[in-house]
Amino acid sequence: MPQLDFANPLMMSKLVWLLIIFGFLYFILKNYALPQVASVLDERAARIAADLDAARDAQAAGEAALAEIRAATAAARAEAQAAIAAAMLEAQTKSAAQAAEINARLAAQVAKAEQQVRAARDQAMGALRGVAGETATAMLDRLAISAPANDVTAAVDRAATQGGR
């Protein structure tokens, strides 16, 4: 192969220049280009690490907020149940008081109605005794039996007190 003929002096100069150029490029890359690339990569890694830390912090904050919300919800639920229980107790107390008031009013109305019925019955019985006395006197007169008015009234009263037996 003629390209790799090391006996040719031109080939040796090419190899020397090749080593010099590669050495110069290595020096430039090592001292200028690669440090900049390394710094960019380091910055990028640091940014990624910072973003991951921020995400972990945000996740922890979110979990803490969620726990706080759950606790607040539980407290609000317990408070609402207590308020409902208190309202139910208050409604039952008011209902019982209203029922007692209505029962008392109804009892008073029943007592008044019973009193009116007794008064009406006594009045009717009084009128009935009078009618019964007059009827008994009329029957005795018709049968041609004479009896004193006091005896007829006493007999009608006695019959009325015995309940008409």
Image (cartoon, rainbow, N blue to C red):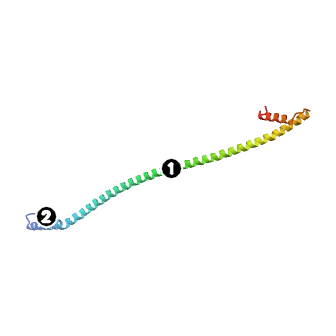
Q: Is residue 162 left or right of residue 30?
A: right
**In this view, which residue lies farthest toward the top?**
165
Up-down: is 127 above or below 162?
below
Q: Is residue 157 left or right of residue 23?
A: right
Amino acid on which disc 2 is placed: Gln
Up-down: is 59 above or below 30?
above
Residue at the disc numbered 1: 86
Q: Is residue 76 left or right of residue 154?
A: left
Q: Nearer the viewer, residue 74 or 112?
A: 112
Locate the N terminus by quadrant: bottom left
Disc on res. 3: 2
Write the residue at 18% across / 66% down.
29
Where residue 114 appears, as percent x and y from the top left, is: 71, 42
**Quadrant of residue 17 within the rendered picture:** bottom left
Q: Nearest to the eye among marks 2 and 1: give it.
A: 1
Q: Earlier in the sequence, mark 2 or mark 1?
A: 2
Label 2: how many residues lie within 10 Å, few (<14), some (14-19) or many (20+)?
few
Q: Secondary structure at mark 1?
A: helix
Write the residue at 53% across / 50% down.
90
Q: Is residue 154 left or right of residue 141?
A: left
Q: Nearer the viewer, residue 30 or 46?
A: 46
**Quadrant of residue 2 within the rendered picture:** bottom left
Amino acid on which disc 1 is placed: Ala
Label 1: how many residues lie within 10 Å, few (<14), some (14-19) or many (20+)?
few
**Quadrant of residue 59 within the rendered picture:** bottom left
Where residue 26 appears, as percent x and y from the top left, is: 15, 65
Q: Nearer the viewer, residue 53 or 79?
A: 79
Q: Nearer the viewer, residue 139 or 20?
A: 139
Find the distance from the CA under tag 2 to the CA under tag 1: 104 Å
Q: Secondary structure at mark 2?
A: helix
